[in-house]
Amino acid sequence: MKSIVIDPSKVRDIGPLLLDAEGGLRVLPASDLKGTNAAERLMFGVRHGIYSIPTIELVEYLRERVAGRCAIEIGAGSGVLARALGIPATDNRQQEEPGLKAYYAQLGQPTVPYGEHVERLDASEAVTKYKPEVVIACWVTHRFDPARESAGGSSSGVDEAAIIAACDEYIFIGNEQVHAHKPIWELPHEKQTPAWLFSRAANGSPDFVATWRRAPKS
């Protein structure tokens, strides 16, 4: 993937806009985010370990999709989205591991700021525990498959096909270029690229929200 270089001295710090007095990520209306640009969002994301920047419109969209069903967020990170939705936040919290913390320190980057309410569960454990009808994920990495090396992924990533098979609806928020090689694109899905989605991606491709539904039993 092509790297993007920005000069921090020439990019506005949007932290005061996006963070509250305690340093937590705010959920703002999309109109506030539209006053920012890709370089500003990228610098903010790198400085604070943030990938997806939730908006009020995203929360409202997800609340309507969930429609009162049992739902959880996996790979929740800071947990701000799950908190806004009033659903359990789960994450394997792998960036708390000493080796990964040291790796990010060498890069001069912070690790993900996990929220205190984010339960340490990997995706499969979370689904087993909560038995959700809806699973929501933002920017999670899929499980690496040696048979499909070109698809990339991580050995500790999410087996998204298994998640889809275990719930009624899997909703993923990501970026078209960053998440172009997910194996689950081969499964039937719906995808939208609304203007109220924002992230740290600065590659020129749109952010998306996509939905997969469990195949009906024959």
Image (cartoon, rainbow, N blue to C red):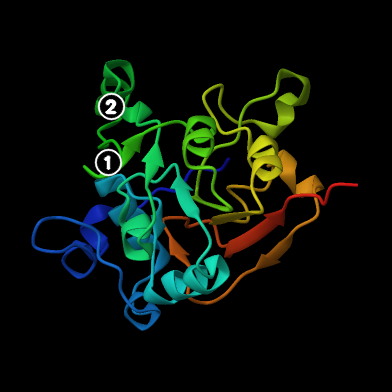
**x, y (%) of residue 151?**
70, 33
Give 143 or 72, whichever is nearer the viewer: 72
Q: Is residue 205 visible?
A: no
* Residue at the spot of label 1: 114
Q: Are marks 1 and 2 in contact (CB under 8 Å)?
A: yes
Q: Which quadrant of the view contains residue 108?
A: top left
Task: Say what amino acid the circle numbered 1 marks.
Answer: Tyr
Q: Which residue is mark 2?
A: 96
Residue sitting at 31 percent across and 16 percent down? 99
Identify which residue is drawn at 54% across, 32% down: 124
Marks 1 and 2 sit apart, C-alpha to C-alpha, by 9 Å
Element type at marker 2?
Answer: helix
**Left-right relation of 119 to 20:** right
- Say what secondary structure mark 1 lies in: loop
From the viewer's perspective, is 123 left or right of 98?
A: right
Lower sequence index among marks 1 and 2: 2
**Relative to 18, is 170 above or below?**
above
Q: Is 188 positioned to the left or the right of 163 in the image?
A: right
| Mark 1 Cα-neighbour bin, 10 Å: few <14, some 14–19, many ≥20 | many
Q: Position of residue 87 (x, y in %)?
A: 39, 56
Residue type at mark 2 is Glu
Mark 2 crowdedness (10 Å alpha carbons): few <14, some 14-19, many ≥20: some
Q: Residue at x 27, y 36 (%)?
A: 109
Q: Looking at the image, is 111 positioned above or below residue 8?
A: above
